């Protein structure tokens, strides 16, 4: 695996951060099982809103639905942010789309390319997976005290560096821009963007977030197979609705919305 010379350094990230609350405390390690698990641990010990955990590699990086997240050293971003919003509990599930919008905007601005959202948590460029988001609830004494927002972005991986099964489905920032990318700069831009979208969300901008997600919806108008638990449905994607759920027009003609699920374009 080719590694870039550039190391993950707080001294390079911090001067580029223009936020009020996110990323003022940066924890950076060379290796950890999973930054989300690490964030959960620190959160349970009282870590504050906005603390960011970054690792150069993960030995048990996790994706959605218990999948493994390929996390080799020196080439990608594995980052988790502790968020402690003071909002009603049910709103916290909206954070996957808030973080998705922020990540899509940051990466689109950096690359000059359309980075789309594949509901609920994938980031795609030209239908290839560039990254993903894994938001998990922080539960303390049986109540929700925050959310860990985990972000994985493929940065300097070349096509041959991906395992065989991902090679035709995954891409990286350096592949799509044909340029060398400094991970420190991407991290700062991500946090700056995340703070703007998070603040917008707190300020009642959920409708605007949904609109943005629909404008960047990689599944819009596509025929998909959606699996959710033991159920699977085929239909055409209509939109992400005002609750952040995916609306499909099923083959039967019926319109149905899904709160969660895994989609494949067919
Ligand atoms: C997905 O697409 O299924 C979500 C992938 C999320 C991966 C990130 S990498 C940083 C954080 N730590 C983890 O173990 N997972 C998330």
Image (cartoon, grey):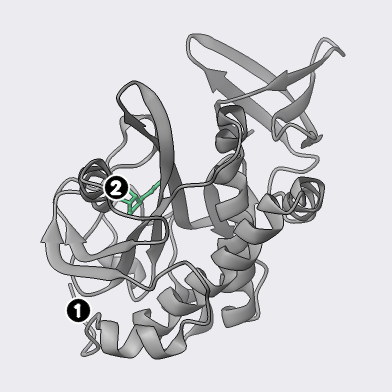
Instruction: From the viewer's perspective, tell me whether residue 98 is left or right of residue 149.
Output: right
Residue found at x 54% / y 20%: 227
Per the model, the C-alpha gap separating discs 2 and 1 is 25 Å
**Which element is circle 1 on?**
loop
To which residue does mark 1 refer?
A: 2
Q: In this view, does 68 lie above or below 99?
A: above
Q: 2 or 238, which lies in front?
A: 238
Q: Closer to the camera: disc 2 or disc 1?
A: 2
Q: What residue occupies the far right of the structure in this picture?
A: 253
Q: Residue 208: image x %, image y %?
A: 80, 53
Residue 158, image quadrant: bottom left
Q: Which of the image's four quarters has the C terminus?
A: top right
Q: 156 or 103, which lies in front?
A: 103
To which residue does mark 2 refer?
A: 36
Q: Residue 235: image x %, image y %?
A: 74, 23
Residue found at x 27% / y 41%: 68
Q: Is mark 1 within 8 Å of ligand 1?
A: no
Residue 7, image quadrant: bottom left
């Amino acid at each position: 695996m080719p590694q870039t010379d550039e190391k993950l350094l707080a001294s390079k990230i911090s001067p580029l951060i223009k936020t009020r609350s996110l990323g003022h405390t940066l924890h950076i390690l060379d290796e950890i099982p999973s930054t989300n698990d690490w964030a959960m641990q620190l959160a349970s010990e009282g870590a504050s809103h906005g603390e960011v955990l970054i690792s150069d590699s993960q030995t048990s990086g996790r994706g959605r639905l218990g999948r493994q997240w390929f996390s080799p050293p020196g080439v990608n971003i594995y980052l988790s942010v502790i968020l402690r919003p003071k909002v009603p509990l049910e709103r916290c599930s909206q954070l996957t789309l808030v973080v998705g919008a922020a990540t899509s905007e940051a990466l689109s601005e950096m690359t000059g390319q359309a980075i789309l959202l594949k509901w609920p948590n994938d980031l795609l460029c030209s239908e290839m997976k560039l990254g993903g988001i894994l938001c998990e609830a922080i539960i303390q004494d049986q109540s929700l005290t925050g959310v860990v927002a985990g972000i994985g972005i493929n940065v300097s991986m070349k096509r041959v560096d991906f395992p065989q099964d991902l090679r035709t489905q995954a891409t990286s920032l350096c592949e799509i821009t044909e340029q060398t990318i400094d991970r420190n700069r991407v991290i700062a831009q991500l946090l700056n963007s995340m703070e703007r979208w998070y603040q917008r969300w707190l300020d009642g901008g959920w409708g605007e977030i949904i609109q943005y997600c629909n404008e960047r919806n990689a599944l819009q108008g596509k025929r998909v197979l959606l699996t959710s638990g033991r159920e699977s449905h085929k239909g055409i994607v209509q939109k992400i609705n005002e609750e952040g759920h995916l609306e499909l027009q099923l083959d039967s003609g019926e319109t149905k919305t899904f709160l969660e699920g895994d989609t494949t374009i067919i």
